[in-house]
């Protein structure tokens, strides 16, 4: 908890100084890089946007969310409801860009609309993981795709290997715990490859150039699936 408070304090102090100089985002990025080096295993807390800046609140929430979820172990065995595309960062280079709510909203909405066309819809698509390493994605009545998976419970590293229908596409990523569920995150370009393949297999035509343009300068960006465990 003390480390979390230290992070918030460091970011807030830097933000206050930057407001006077017109360099808020740059100062936040520098302060975050320093503060993150001193904390990785803290418990939960709530971040309040004390400055009234939407971007500052988004940055703080994103930073603490990544810190709090990365090192908690999870089991994928069971049935999960798909709740949309997840976004995260794995590099300081995308810290400020990804924290922008407008950027996140546009990217997630585009990808969600693409996946909905092939049956992977928020709130209704089902992800199922079995103990023997099999997984499937269905629309509730029909299996859309399936394959095998491995999960390292020590590091939360996950590998999804899709079947022949998806040209044996492999997605390597990380499972991050969230309240009531988890996120499966992987490299953004690999997730876009999965999306394009799903669209092609379903016989749909979607122009993905907008998403490709959004990802062009987003080094370190991760995309994936938000999942909620079914009771």
Image (cartoon, rainbow, N blue to C red):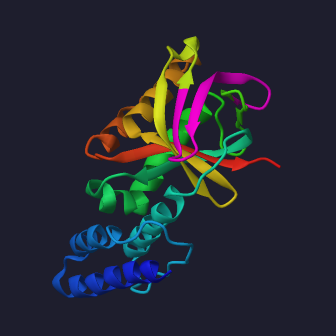
User: Among all residues in the image, which is located at the extreme top?
Assistant: 164
Q: Is residue 227 above or below residue 125?
A: below
Given residues 157 and 88, the one toward you in this image is 157
Q: Is residue 110 visible?
A: no
Could you tell me residue 8's position as x and y percent?
40, 81
Point out residue 121 in the picture as x, y percentages from the top left corner: 66, 38
Q: Nearer the viewer, residue 106 or 43?
A: 43
- 88 above or below 40? above
> As rendered, which of 100 and 8 lies closer to the eye?
8
Q: Residue at x 71, y 27 (%)?
A: 132
Q: Kindly identify the residue that appears in the image at 25 percent across and 76 percent down.
A: 24
Q: Which quadrant holds residue 215?
A: top left
In magenta stretch: residue 59? no
The number of callouts visible is: 0
| View extreme (left): residue | 21
> Is residue 185 shown left or right of residue 147?
left
Asked if one can make out residue 170 in the rendered structure from this viewpoint, the answer is yes
Magenta-colored segment: predominant secondary structure: strand
Q: Tell me: 133 left or right of 154.
A: right
Determine the residue positioned at 72% across, 42% down: 80
Q: Position of residue 127 (x, y in %)?
A: 69, 36
Bounds of the magenta span?
Answer: 137-160
Residue lying farthest front?
154
Q: Is residue 171 above or below residue 49?
A: above
User: Picture coordinates of residue 150 (x, y %)?
Assistant: 57, 32
């Amino acid at each position: 908890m003390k480390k979390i408070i230290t992070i918030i304090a460091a970011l807030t102090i830097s933000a206050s100084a930057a407001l006077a100089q017109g360099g808020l985002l740059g100062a936040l990025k520098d302060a975050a890089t320093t503060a993150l080096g001193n904390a990785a295993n803290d418990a939960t807390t709530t971040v309040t946007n004390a400055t009234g800046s939407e971007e500052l609140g988004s940055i703080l929430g994103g930073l603490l969310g990544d810190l709090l979820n990365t090192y908690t172990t999870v089991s994928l065995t069971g049935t999960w409801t798909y709740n949309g595309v997840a976004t995260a960062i794995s590099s300081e280079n995308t810290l400020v860009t990804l924290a922008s709510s407008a950027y996140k909203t546009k990217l997630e909405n585009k990808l969600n609309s693409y996946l909905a066309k092939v049956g992977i819809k928020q709130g209704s698509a089902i992800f199922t993981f079995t103990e023997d390493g099999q997984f499937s994605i269905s629309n509730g009545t029909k299996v859309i795709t399936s394959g095998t998976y491995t999960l390292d419970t020590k590091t939360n590293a996950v590998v999804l290997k899709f079947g022949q229908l998806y040209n044996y596409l492999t997605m390597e990523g990380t499972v991050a715990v969230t309240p009531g569920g988890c996120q499966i995150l992987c490299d953004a370009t690999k997730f876009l490859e999965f999306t394009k393949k799903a669209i092609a297999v379903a016989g749909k035509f979607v122009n993905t150039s907008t998403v490709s343009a959004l990802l062009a300068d987003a080094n370190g960006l991760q995309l994936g699936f938000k999942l909620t465990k079914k009771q």
